[in-house]
Image (spheres, grey):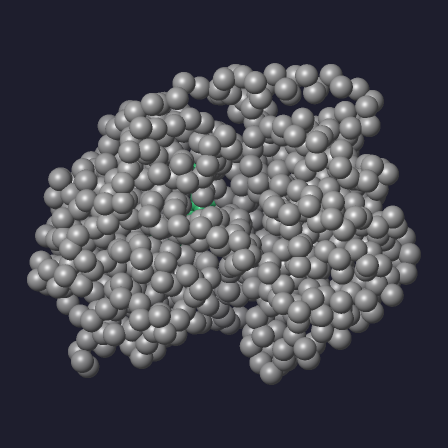
Amino acid sequence: MTTSLIGYPRIGAKRELKFAIEKFFKKELSESELETVAKTQRQLNWQTQFAAGIDFIPSNDFSFYDTTLDTAFALNIVPERYQALAISPLEKYFAAARGHQSEAGDVKALAMKKWFNTNYHYMVPEFDDGTVLKLDLSKLLSEYQEALALGITTKPVLIGPYTLLKLIKFTGQSTIATVQDDFVSIYAEVFEKLAAEKIDWLQLDEPALVFDLSAEDIGLVKAIYTPLLAQKKSVKVLLQTYFGDVRDIYTDLVRLDVDGIGLDFVEGRKTAELIETHGFPTDKKLFAGVVNGKNIWRNNYQKTLAILAKLPKDKLIISSSCSLQHVPYTVSAETDLDEKILRHFAFAQEKLQEIKDINVIFYQLETGSLAENKALFDEKRFEADLTVQEKVSGLSSSDYSRTPDFSAREAIQKEVFKLPTLPTTTIGSFPQTADVRKNRLNFKRGDITKAAYDDFNKTKTKEWIDWQEAIGFDVLVHGEFERNDMVEYFGEKLAGYIFTKYAWVQSYGTRCVKPPIVWGDIARVQQLSVADSVYAQSLTDKPVKGMLTGPVTILNWSFPREDISLSESTLQIALAIQEEVLDLEKNGIKIIQIDEAALREKLPLRQTDWDSQYLDWAIPAFRLVHAKVAPTTQIHTHMCYSEFTDIIPAIDAMDADVISFEASRSDLSILDALQENGFRTQTGPGVYDIHSPRIPSLDEIENVIHKLLTKVPLEKLWINPDCGLKTRGVTEVKASLENLVKATQAIRATL
Ligand SMILES: Nc1nc2c(c(=O)[nH]1)N[C@@H](CNc1ccc(C(=O)N[C@@H](CCC(=O)N[C@@H](CCC(=O)N[C@@H](CCC(=O)O)C(=O)O)C(=O)O)C(=O)O)cc1)CN2
Ligand code: MET
Ligand SMILES: [Zn+2]
């Protein structure tokens, strides 16, 4: 037993599960039909891993929406508002994930947040005064039995108690301190149930251990795990960490009575050093995460073997650095790409082979794949674009600052735009309905001409421009109908990028992304958005925002190169987007929004690692994009999902004129932080949650605006939804936005 996996993608190699769940939402599929699709996907996953020869194969890594939500349901951390609905258990689960609006009731969804430093999002469990822990392990146990029936023994996975306590939002009187003993009891009950079923190993995921930990945090881990592990019965426990190193708690972890510890050697800057300095205990297995679970490049076997050589050989289990849910299924589906390119990639299925290869070489059973792997890394992949490289190295400090300063521009722009108080706008995209996607699919298949494709999108844009004018929006958008995704679309147009056909990765629930791959040096070789923006602006006298994705977000939501730094790639992208910004301006676009939804994503999880590693180049990269525009051009940006409260000065330093951000799902808590930091950028905190099909009432939105006005100065406040509306249906979008405009008008009338 020397190889392991933390988790596998679950959405389906051709997104089978995604499509089935979405059909279930539309009532086109019954619960039992959905269950059949799910079962097939689980079986395929286990059989693939089994066939590849992986010893520790995970189960319960499957989910209909999110595994944190599954764990919350398994422990009964489910607010009464969902429990009380007279609908089936599966529908209650989806109600917590997406909100619910029917005769049975009207409830909002749980909050959704970014999963550590990934583009995956988890549902935030809510612990209120009515919460009573109660164990229901039926999902975990039945999945274990399902695999066993196939002859495959698995290691079930659960979110560990420490990480769960840290992720939970306590909405009532309870705190971590008041519930930690109950957590010990309920996880002990998990051990008991697993022991009764003769389950050998349990994986407890504890990624929260890679943050900076206080003495109190360390005390909490010990206070939970010491009594808990005393009750583990015959079950062996793998304490699995990922997304970094556990430097603050390593010496305590190795003293716990666990049977295995999983450490990340890819993102954990200090993992190897910790073992070298403090050793590794003889009574445990070391699950060494050496195959990158987040990027798609082949593993460099020589480098990996050098890491492994320093580890205790008899304790070693070779593993991935994190769950493979963050990479696509298989390279073999990419039939349109040249083998010369494909041989540099390893998606989930190929990573299984890598784990196996490394295992075989390490134990010197055979070394054939080592030579092949070496040759791959010696290969010259592409011709460098020297012009781009010179442009980047020629940048100087003045290229990063816009003049005149913020306040001067604010005054100038008030004069130019003469917008009403509380200007209304949306974030960019309108519903990507079936016909919009079908049109694109037809074009991709060659069934329709480019002209027909464009005409269709133009018709959509015209319809929505007319509608926005009619209901009274102040700053309009063209709707982004031409985009498959806000990052992939730009990747497809920029030189230096390649893109795939089926390389989907789950982002949240049923929603997936297909990150483009940075292959070489990036350059703008054609206009990216000018024609669409100019067309939309030609239809109205109101300003229509030009709509671009910022360089940091484009890079963070791509699969980046590993042979040059992230900052170098980002600056290349920034120069490309800068050209587009200036081109939009030249073509009469007066307001340009540059989305930086993922600005925070690659900020180190540990504050102690914020040493000029990230914000020091990410913020300048954004400034570079808009530094050269005229004072009369208004620059907007947009951010969502992340914790912003600790980087507010950095956001102000982006020097945009207006920022909109996601706020409604996190109780508008960011507003206090804005106030405390004297935030100067004009601000549109989202007034309703767009990730749910539910329609916010007029009253609800008015209340939010009143609340916003207590925190943001009237002359700085914009009114907009949380994020783009591409995932929503037309009816709910129109109803919601009509309420948004009416609520704003009602409040304006009282000013
Ligand atoms: N990259 C990225 N990350 C992000 C976001 C984002 O917008 N982009 N938003 C935040 C939330 N995450 C999100 C991630 C994905 C989606 C989303 O809408 N994804 C779509 C796919 C978008 C896409 O690429 N669409 C393509 C392909 C669509 C498709 O599936 N076509 C069908 C056929 C179409 C049909 O007949 O219906 C097919 O290929 O089989 C297109 O429009 O061209 C989905 O999962 O459904 C939304 C939010 C955070 N991270
Ligand atoms: C995830 S942020 C989305 C921003 C983009 N402009 C949109 O409206 O879809
Ligand atoms: Zn957004």
Nearer to the camera, 339 or 510? 339
Quarter holding the C terminus is bottom left
Q: Quadrant of residue 469?
A: bottom left
The percent coordinates of residue 591 (x first, y second) are 19, 51
Please identify the quadrant where the N terminus is shown: top right
Ligand 1 shows up in the quarter that is top left
Left or right position of 569 against 110:
left
Q: Which quadrant holds residue 535?
A: top left
At x 82%, y 28%, the residue is 363
**Rendered view: 660 above or below 585:** below
- Position of residue 229 measured from the top left corner of the image (x, y, whole percent): 84, 63
Residue 349 position (above or below residue 369)? below
In the image, is residue 644 above or below residue 586? Answer: below
- At horizontal 38% and vertical 34% (from top left) the residue drawn is 491
29 left or right, relative to 180: left
x%, y% of residue 272?
69, 43
Q: Is residue 460 visible?
A: no
